[in-house]
Image (cartoon, grey):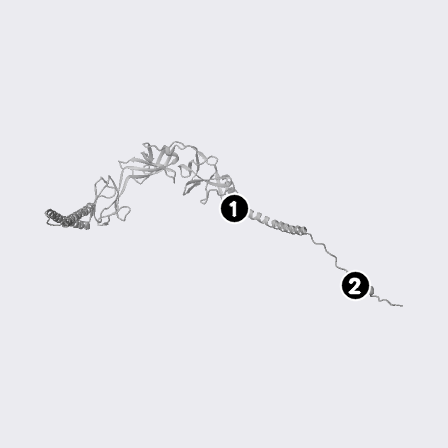
Amino acid sequence: MSHENPNRPADHAAAQHEHESAPEQKPIAASRVILAALLVVLFLAVLAVVGILPRQRAQAALRDTTNELAAPSVIAEAPKPGAPVQELNLPGNVTAYTDAPIYARTAGYLSKWHFDIGAKVKKGALLAEISTPEVDQQLHQAEADLATAEANAANARTQADRYKGLLAQNAVSQQDADTFANQANSTQAQVRSAQANLSRLRELKSFQKVYAPFDGVITARLVDTGQLVDAGSAAGSGRELFRLQATQTLRVYINLPAVYSASAKVGETIELSLPERPGQPVKGTLVRTSDAIDPMSRTLLVEIDIDNHDGKLLAGSLAQVHFKVTPVGSVFVVPVTALIFRQEGLRLGTAANGVAHLVPVTIGEDDGRTVQIISGLTAADRVIVDPPDSLVDGEKVHILSPDEVRAAAGGKQ
């Protein structure tokens, strides 16, 4: 009887397993790899968008809020219509018809003055005398130099004439005769130079006496006896001696708004009032205009002359000129605080749709509280009542009405 090994079937199975190969795997398709990569990228993009967009929206909202809070709040209201301007009250400067500083034309010491302030003098009146010892000595020297030059010239002319006669007799050479002729001409030129110098010093000597250049009144005396004076002018360093004004006729200058320039007619009688003569109007005559509009102020310079032979009016006063004008266009009244003074000219701030604008305007009458706007404004505009100094054209603003401001003030109370 044979015996079988109980481990034999197991060995057989193991041997069979060793002879079997691993099962083959199918390769992954490339389209699936690309699709998976796209899905991953899409997922990451969605995550980025979901995280970035809210942040950008928050930043934009913060920026808008900051800009909105930075915009200044302004009170704007419609301008009030005013009556057409029939008369302009404009300030005018009263000046002398001629105003001249009197300077010395020679150096020396003031020996005497003859008129003081307030004195009325005629043209050619002796105002002062100057002692000029240095000029006197120079004048004496110039007279001596002239005498010497004339003597030398006479001697040279005599020699030249003598040699000219000898040359005719062939007793001297032509060169010698020409030499003495040239010497005669040279000495004659020296005589003319000495004469010019003498004339100059005589002119300086004549300036020892200071005369009035026109009829007028002495308004200032700036030197006294014994003071050293130098020749000078307004542009130099010389001392001004007197100031003389011709006040028989006074000039008044005013700046007329350009819109009324057509109302300025030469020869027209103009009424003026002066603070030192209350209730006593003065008549003047419009004599000339600058015939050009000032591009900075947009005004026309007008000169009015006043007869002042009685001497009752004083130069240097400030007059109110009552100028009759022809009404032009619509007139609006705004507070004086609404005016903006800029380098480019007068401006008015207006507001519309949350944006400020600076518009050029022309003003009429000004009573200190309100001012008339005669050009540059329409009834549809809303005027910024009290604009900030930093306001610029195109700036965003919060527009408030006067009623809203009053309501807010009442609520706080």
Residue 36, image x, y percentages? 66, 51
Neighbour tally class for label 1: few under 14, some 14-19, many 20 plus, Cα within 10 Å: few
User: The disc labelled 1 sits on which kind of residue?
Assistant: Asn
* Along the line of sight, the residue nearer the viewer: 260 or 411: 260
Q: Nearer the viewer, mark 1 or mark 2?
A: 2
Residue 195, image x, y percentages? 17, 46
Residue 247, image x, y percentages? 27, 38
Taking 380 as reference, is 14 above or below it? below
* Residue sitting farthest toward the right: 1
61 left or right of 239 in image = right
Which label number is shown at residue 15? 2
Query: Mark 2: which secondary structure?
Result: helix
Residue found 79% across the figure and 63% down from its top: 15
User: The disc labelled 2 sits on which kind of residue?
Assistant: Ala
Neighbour tally class for label 2: few under 14, some 14-19, many 20 plus, Cα within 10 Å: few
* Along the line of sight, the residue nearer the viewer: 282 or 206: 206
Residue 257, image x, y percentages? 38, 36
Query: Mark 1: which secondary structure?
Result: helix
357 left or right of 276 in image = right
Q: Are marks 1 and 2 in contact (CB under 8 Å)?
A: no
Give the alpha-carbon distance from disc 1 to disc 2, as whole Å. Answer: 86 Å
225 left or right of 272 in image = left
In the rendered image, is residue 30 in sight? Answer: yes
- What is the tally of numbered marks visible in this picture? 2
* Along the line of sight, the residue nearer the viewer: 333 or 325: 325
Query: Can you identify the residue that label 1 sits on?
Result: 67
Q: Which corner quadrant of the image does residue 286 belong to?
A: top left
In the rendered image, is residue 143 in sight? Answer: no
